Amino acid sequence: MKRILFLSVFFMLAAGCSPESKYLGVWVEPVPGMEGTFQGVKLEKGGTASSVNMQTLVYQSWALHGDSVVLTGQSVGNGQTIDFAENFTLRKEGGDWTLQAQDGSVVYRRNK
């Protein structure tokens, strides 16, 4: 019985230490011109992603590729839907973790 309990705890801790665990959570940036309002992405276990406060940029999934996080989804608007994939890099700035688009256009900070 003790062995089963030990193994259960071990596997739960190991799952929490997976490379993807540091990416899980809500990542946001301020909405330009709308003080106190944020937008971004929520990264969940299993590669599921969802948009935070963005109706026209619909995040659907995410995956790790080396040191990059690839977010995929659809841009919806003006009567058309366009699939996209965008590469981000995890960085530590000061005491905060950020996800930065490789082209520098977007910087999401982990929502605390």
Image (cartoon, rainbow, N blue to C red):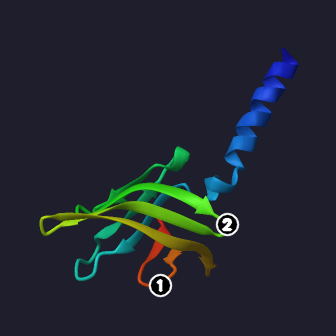
Q: Is residue 95 visible?
A: no
Could you tell me residue 8's position as x and y percent?
75, 27
Task: Tell me the distance, in whole angstroms, between the alpha carbons under discs 2 and 1.
Answer: 17 Å
Q: In the image, what residue occupies the spot 46% across and 49% down?
A: 48
The amino acid sitting under disc 1 is Asp
Q: Which label sits on residue 103?
A: 1
Q: In the image, what residue occupies the spot 12% across and 65% down?
A: 79
Q: Kindly identify which residue carries mark 2.
A: 66
Q: How many marks?
A: 2
| Element marked by disc 1 | loop
Q: In the image, what residue occupies the spot 79% across and 35% down?
A: 10
Specify the farthest residue to the bottom.
104
Position of 1 relative to 23 (above/below): above
Could you tell me residue 101's position as x and y percent?
48, 77
Among the 4 quarters of the image, the one containing residue 27:
bottom left
Specify the farthest residue to the right.
3
Q: Is residue 47 left or right of residue 34?
A: right
Q: Is residue 28 visible?
A: yes
In the rendered structure, which disc, 2 or 1, sits on the residue that comes first in sequence?
2
| Element marked by disc 2 | loop
Position of 89 relative to 45 (above/below): below
Among the 4 quarters of the image, the one containing residue 64:
bottom right
Choose between 28 and 103: the one closer to the eye: 103
Q: Residues within 10 Å of mark 1 (few under 14, many from 20)?
A: few
Could you tell me residue 20's position as x and y percent?
63, 54
Position of 92 relative to 17 (above/below): below
Specify the farthest residue to the left.
79
Contact (Cβ within 8 Å) of mark 2 with mark 1: no
